[in-house]
Amino acid sequence: MCGIVGAVSAKDSTPFLLKGLATLEYRGYDSAGLALLTSDGVSGLQRARSKGRVAELATLVKQQTFSGNIGIAHTRWATHGVPAERNAHPHISGKLALVHNGIIENYESLREQLQGLGYVFTSDTDTETIVHLIQACFKGLIGEPAENLFSAVQCAVVHLKGAFALAVISEEEPDCLVVAREGSPLMLGVAEDGYYAASDASALLSVTKRMMYLENGDVARLSRDAVLVVDGIGQMVERAIVTSSLNANAVELGDYSHYMQKEIFEQPQALSNTLEMISGAGQLQPGIFGAEAAEIFQQVDSVLILACGTSSYAGMTAKYWIEQVAGIPCNVEIASEYRYRQSVPNPDQLVVVISQSGETADTLAALHHAKVQGHNCTLAICNVPESAIMRETALRFITRAGPEIGVASTKAFTTQLSALFLLTLLLAKVKQRLSAEDEKVYLDELRHLPIAVDKVLALEPSIEKWAQHFSNKQHALFLGRGRHYPIALEGALKLKEITYIHAEAYPAGELKHGPLALVDSEMPVVVVAPNDEMLEKLKANMQEVSARGGQLYVFADGGSAMKPTEGVNVQLMPEHYGLLSPVLHVVALQLLSYHVALVKGTDVDKPRNLAKSVTVE
Ligand code: G6P
């Protein structure tokens, strides 16, 4: 989703701003822009905006020979107003220029008020309201006249409802950049030659690893050699400088064609890293989820998992594990539903939020909602250690997948599954449902998982052959049963996200209750069919498809005794993997979608209309 970068530097900020925007491209966007000022104030405000890629903006900037020590830049993912140059950020009011992430919920009433004061709007965005509002505060048309840009921003943010991270510069103060945040992420980079700001730590790595995370309500003034931060009640505060553990190389594409491909193939390593703490362990310790984990796991009588997208399918898989192995009830809810639903809170329930980014607005709001309802036993499973979600729960587990850039989640999902399996085992252990023998068996299986995934990756050439069969289809059906039903859902999600083929997943037993009506010779039906307790039932469901001329693409494994026949394509997985088999099967489905996308020539890493981190509702 939208991304922000900003800089106050001794040198020309333009290269940093453009590189920062390129780093943020993965989040998803449809237009980009920047504004610059020179610290001598001579060249005034320079602005360039373009609908389309950052590369186009870079060409524009080069043609116009823009430069400046102070600058702000933005990638926009359209919410209010179509993708168009006039709606791209920065937005200008007089001598001010501003970029913004988030959504201003009261923008309509503010817009009316500001129009009443004579401000003329040139865009359809909620953002333009903010820049005029700051101008109005500056001039004293709203409140007392502000002394400077910093106090004008402090005055303006009080009137904003919703979520925002913003950065603003003024031609009249060509020595500073003012930023503010509420709800949306924003961090500062502390470097030798100046101060930087970004909505995502990865965008700062080209200049520094030293970062300062702003809190909700903070407003900060950045100048060449100082930063001043005030909190939501106007008090001066110090925010700690931390050294980011992110590695700039980790966000490079290297020899791969796409980030999604790189991330699929990084899964064995990502799993090894995530499971490192059990590499030599004879038994599991609850402490891997946090100091209070033993006590909290003892107290809880059930689990509620809240998440969005792929992360919610990780949760759905875990429901099967938790209920079967730990023997306690587990429910999974889509965060955007839970946050507005009247549920029945149970303080002895463990609330687990799962998020790759740790920034997803609905997941964060669902966590807040759960806490307000009296849920104190909270756990975050997240891939970004510095994210908001990680700071807001009693317990936490960091998946160590490394930065995930492809919009379609892959390695984050499999590492989430590994974390959730650890959670399952620990809950079972605390509830005395796990024998020492079983614990050892499961730990061994987890330790072997990276090797097992590696073997699935070796199937790529034969999975690739199937891709041709999907590329001219309009629809596809995915079937699974039991703990592989969420894997069918995830397989269908991958296909629709990156190939734009309409794909639906069903628990195979539901076929007769509707989707069978869709099946004909034009309908590819992908089946997740390991040799587990549901296989015989699943085979009967496959017969139903074959009898209607449907084309089956079956991911089976050794013991399932499935052979290819007319209309039935079979891919045997290298080994049967019991409870952890969802982890292997999803990797095969990722490869299938990836290769269908290659045949179709779609934008694998940045599918249309989608964003990586959904920081607005
Ligand atoms: C977006 C991404 C998905 C992701 C979902 C939840 O839709 O494109 O890949 O699964 O957000 O994101 P989270 O960061 O909370 O896991």
Image: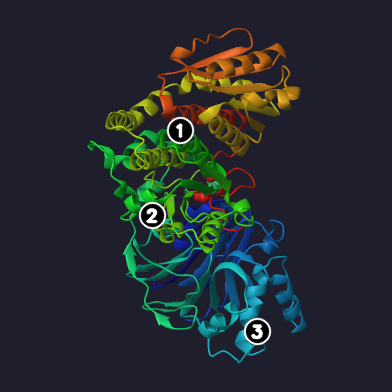
Q: Quadrant of the C terminus?
A: bottom right
Q: Position of residue 44 (x, y in %)?
A: 56, 78
Vertical side of 358 occupied by 466: above or below? above
The answer to whether any part of residue 608 appears in the image is: yes
Q: Confirm or reject: label 3 Cβ below 8 Å from ligand 1.
A: no
Q: What residue would you read off at disc 2?
A: 395
Q: Position of residue 350 (x, y in %)?
A: 45, 50
Q: Position of residue 271 (x, y in %)?
A: 36, 37
Mark 1 surroundings: few (<14), some (14-19) or many (≥20) residues within 10 A = some
Vertical side of 518 occupied by 401: above or below? below
Q: In the shown orientation, is residue 81 left or right of residue 365?
A: right
Q: Position of residue 592 (x, y in %)?
A: 54, 27
Q: Confirm or reject: label 1 Cβ below 8 Å from ligand 1.
A: no
Q: Earlier in the sequence, mark 2 or mark 3?
A: 3
Q: Residue at x 42, y 41 (%)?
A: 420
Q: Residue at x 34, y 61 (%)?
A: 209
Vertical side of 357 occupied by 271: above or below? above
Q: What residue would you read off at disc 3?
A: 136
| Label 1 to label 3: alpha-carbon separation | 61 Å
**What's the residue type where badge 1 is placed?**
Gln
Q: What residue would you read off at disc 1?
A: 324
**What's the residue type where badge 2 is placed?**
Leu
Residue 412: mark:
none
Q: In the shown orientation, is residue 44 left or right of residue 268?
A: right
Mark 1–mark 3 CB contact (< 8 Å): no
Q: Residue at x 60, y 86 (%)?
A: 138
> Quarter-wise, where is residue 415 in the image?
top left
Mark 3 surroundings: few (<14), some (14-19) or many (≥20) residues within 10 A = many
The front one of 263 and 321 is: 321
